[in-house]
Image (cartoon, rainbow, N blue to C red):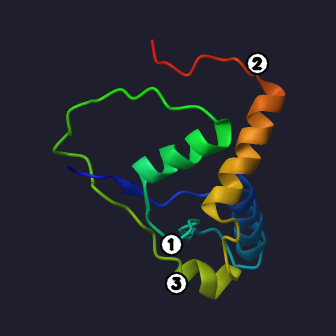
């Protein structure tokens, strides 16, 4: 079967990257723009991410199977060469740590018995 893989980023790392990019841009002469990838530069299989979430929440996920869209990309990973050269090393949060911190926040701000099933 096909396993989708993605390059996930934790919101704290994204926020830090935006702050650094803003400081960087303020030192440039005149108007202009640059594009910076803010990502982990590591591919994580989506099924393994779901398994991590199952472990964190202590219950199995409810899977919805969909056909694979031929326009979808099997895997993504961003290059951080330009970002690291101009903004410094980013990001620093490992996937499991980010998922755990997100889950703690989610449960603290939402009803802990929220039903994860899609309508």
Quadrant in the picture for the C terminus: top left
| Direction right: furthest residue | 108
Depth check: give the residue in front, 86 or 84: 84
| Direction top: furthest residue | 119
Where 117 sits versus 34, above or below? above
- The residue labelled by disc 1 is 41
- The residue labelled by disc 2 is 111
User: In 3D space, how far apart are the residues under numbered discs 3 and 1 (Cα atoms)?
Assistant: 10 Å
Q: Label 2's element?
A: loop
* Residue found at x 26% / y 30%: 66
Q: Position of residue 81 (x, y in %)?
A: 52, 84
Q: In which image quadrant can residue 17 be found?
A: bottom right
Q: Position of residue 63 (x, y in %)?
A: 39, 29
Q: In which image quadrant can residue 67 be found?
A: top left
User: In 3D space, how far apart are the residues under numbered discs 2 and 1 (Cα atoms)?
Assistant: 33 Å
* Residue found at x 81% / y 27%: 109
Q: Tell us which disc is closer to us: 3 or 1.
A: 1
* Residue found at x 70% / y 17%: 113
Q: Tell us which disc is closer to us: 2 or 3.
A: 2
Contact between labelled residues 1 and 3, with CB atoms less than 8 Å apart: no
- The residue labelled by disc 3 is 81
Q: Earlier in the sequence, mark 3 or mark 1?
A: 1
* Label 3 packing within 10 angstroms: few (<14), some (14-19), many (20+): few
Q: How many tags in the picture?
A: 3
């Amino acid at each position: 079967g096909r396993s989708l893989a993605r390059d996930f980023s934790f919101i704290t790392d994204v926020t830090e990257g935006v702050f650094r990019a803003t400081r960087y841009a303020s030192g440039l002469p005149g108007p202009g723009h640059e594009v910076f990838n803010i990502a982990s530069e590591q591919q994580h299989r989506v099924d393994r991410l779901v398994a991590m979430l199952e472990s964190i929440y202590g219950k199995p996920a409810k899977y919805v199977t969909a056909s694979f869209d031929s326009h979808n990309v099997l895997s993504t990973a961003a290059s951080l060469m330009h970002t690291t050269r101009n903004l410094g090393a980013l990001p620093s949060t490992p996937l499991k740590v980010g998922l755990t911190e997100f889950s703690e926040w989610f449960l603290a701000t939402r009803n802990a018995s929220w039903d994860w099933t899609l309508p």
